[in-house]
Image (tube, helix red, strand yellow):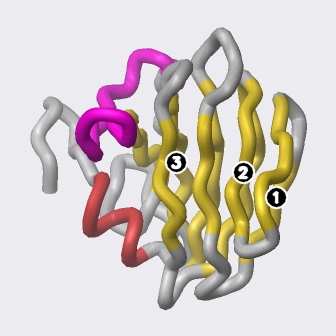
Amino acid sequence: MVKFKLDELPGTFIGEGQTRREVKLFSSPNSDIATEHFALGMTIIEPGQEHEVHEHELNSEVQVIYAGAGVMRTRDGEIPVEKGDVIGLATEEPHGFANTGAEALKILWVYYPPGLAEEKFLIRKGGGES
C-alpha cells in the first residue's frame, strides 16, 4: 500500500509567465503507485494564470475540477468550469484552462495510455525526477 497527502506530494512547475502552473503525478507505470494502463495526476493553476490550449496526440483524458473555478477553452469557445465538473476529452481534442477565480484551480486528470504524463512529470520518492 502507498498513501500520501495530496497537497504534500511534490510537483513539477512548467510554463513561464502567464502559463506557469504546477503538475503532480500520483500514479503511472513507473511511479510509487504503479498503474499499467493510465496515469493519474493534478494540474494546479493559480488565480490569473492559464494553461494554454493544447491537444494530446496519443492520449484520451478525463478531468475532474477538484477545486476552484475558471474557464475551459475548446475549439468551440470558452466553457465555465467549477468544482465538481467532470470533463471527457478524446484524443487530439483541443483544450486549455484559465483560472478566473480567487483560489487555485485544481484539475484532477487521468490520461490513457499513460506515456505522456509519465515522460513529463514523474518524480520518484526522495524528490528526484525519473
Q: Quadrant of residue 95?
A: bottom right
**Mark 3 to mark 1: distance in Å?**
15 Å
| Residue 49 pos. (x, y %) | 48, 31
Q: Which residues are magenta?
A: 5-20
- The picture places residue 10, in percent across and down from the top left corner, at 31, 28
The Cα atoms of the two marked residues, 2 and 1, are separated by: 10 Å
- Describe residue 124's horizontal placement relative to residue 46 as left or right: left
Q: Nearer the viewer, residue 61 or 48?
A: 48
Q: Amino acid at mark 2?
A: Met
User: Pointers 2 and 1 in contact (CB under 8 A)?
Assistant: yes
From mark 2 to mark 3, how far is it between C-alphas? 18 Å
Residue type pointed to by label 3: Gly
In the image, what residue occupies the spot 50% across and 22% down? 46
Give me the disc on residue 72. Answer: 2
Give the structural element (helix, strand or loop) at label 3. strand
Q: Residue 32: horizontal and vertical position, in percent?
A: 36, 48
Task: Write the residue at 83% across / 32% down.
Answer: 82
Asked if the stretch drawn in magenta spans residue 11, the answer is yes
Q: Residue furthest top?
A: 102
Q: What amino acid does circle 1 point to?
A: Ile
Quarter placement of the C terminus = bottom left
> Looking at the image, is 11 positioned above or below residue 73?
above
Tag 3 near tag 1, CB within 8 Å: no
Identify the residue under disc 3: 41
Looking at the picture, how far across and down is residue 39, in whole percent? 51, 63
Q: Residues within 10 Å of mark 1 (few under 14, many from 20)?
A: few
Residue positioned 51% across, 79% down in the render: 56
Q: Which mark is residue 104?
A: none
